């Protein structure tokens, strides 16, 4: 028995990371689920737009899925880079506050 109640159709969109809703167009569409099909070079992909809530599924050739995956990996790398910057900034603020507290004798050996 098929996992699909209705056979998903081919999706001819060029950029799977862009929301197909005309009034949205967000370029952060995410994969909700995907699976390689028995047929060579074909994938079933369920996408979700975090901006407008659109969700859709379709069949895609693996070159488009590969392009989508590269966009997702790039987004992941950019997000991790931003987290590192935020963590470094938090640590810098912590160190500045600690140094200021030491200078003002607000921290004494008994604090440890
Ligand atoms: Zn959208």
Image: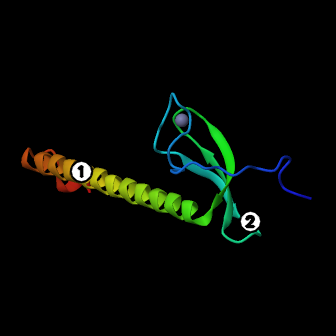
Which residue is depicted at the point 83% across and 51% down?
Answer: 4
The color scheme shown is: rainbow
Image coordinates of residue 111 in percent, x first then y, are: 24, 52
Nearest to the eye among marks 2 and 1: give it.
Answer: 2
Image coordinates of residue 30 in percent, x first then y, are: 55, 49
- Quadrant that contains the C terminus: bottom left
Q: Quadrant of residue 20?
A: top right
- Quadrant that contains the N terminus: bottom right
Front-lying residue, 64 or 89? 64
Q: Splitting the image into four quadrants, where does ligand 1 fall?
A: top right
Front-lying residue, 10 or 55? 10
- Whether 29 is drawn above or below 43: the answer is above
Image coordinates of residue 92 in percent, x first then y, are: 20, 52
Give the structural element (helix, strand or loop) at label 1. Answer: helix
User: In the rendered structure, which disc, 2 or 1, sits on the residue that comes first in sequence?
Assistant: 2
Disc on res. 39? none
Image coordinates of residue 109 in percent, x first then y, are: 19, 56
- Whether 105 is drawn above or below 25: the answer is below
Q: Residue furthest front?
A: 12
Q: Name the residue under label 1.
A: 89
Which residue is depicted at the point 25% across and 55% down?
Answer: 88
Q: Mark 2 points at which residue?
A: 37
Front-lying residue, 52 or 103? 52
Q: Which residue lies furthest to the top in this view?
A: 23
């Amino acid at each position: 028995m098929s996992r699909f109640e209705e056979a998903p159709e081919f999706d001819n969109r060029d950029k799977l990371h862009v929301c197909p809703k005309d009034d949205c167009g967000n370029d952060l569409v995410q994969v909700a689920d995907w699976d390689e099909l028995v047929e060579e070079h074909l994938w079933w992909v369920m996408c979700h737009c975090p901006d407008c809530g659109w969700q859709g599924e379709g069949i895609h050739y693996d070159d488009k899925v590969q392009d989508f995956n590269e966009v997702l990996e790039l987004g992941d790398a950019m997000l991790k880079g931003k987290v590192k910057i935020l963590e470094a900034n938090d640590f810098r603020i912590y160190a500045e506050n600690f140094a200021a507290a030491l200078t003002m004798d607000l921290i004494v050996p008994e604090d440890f």
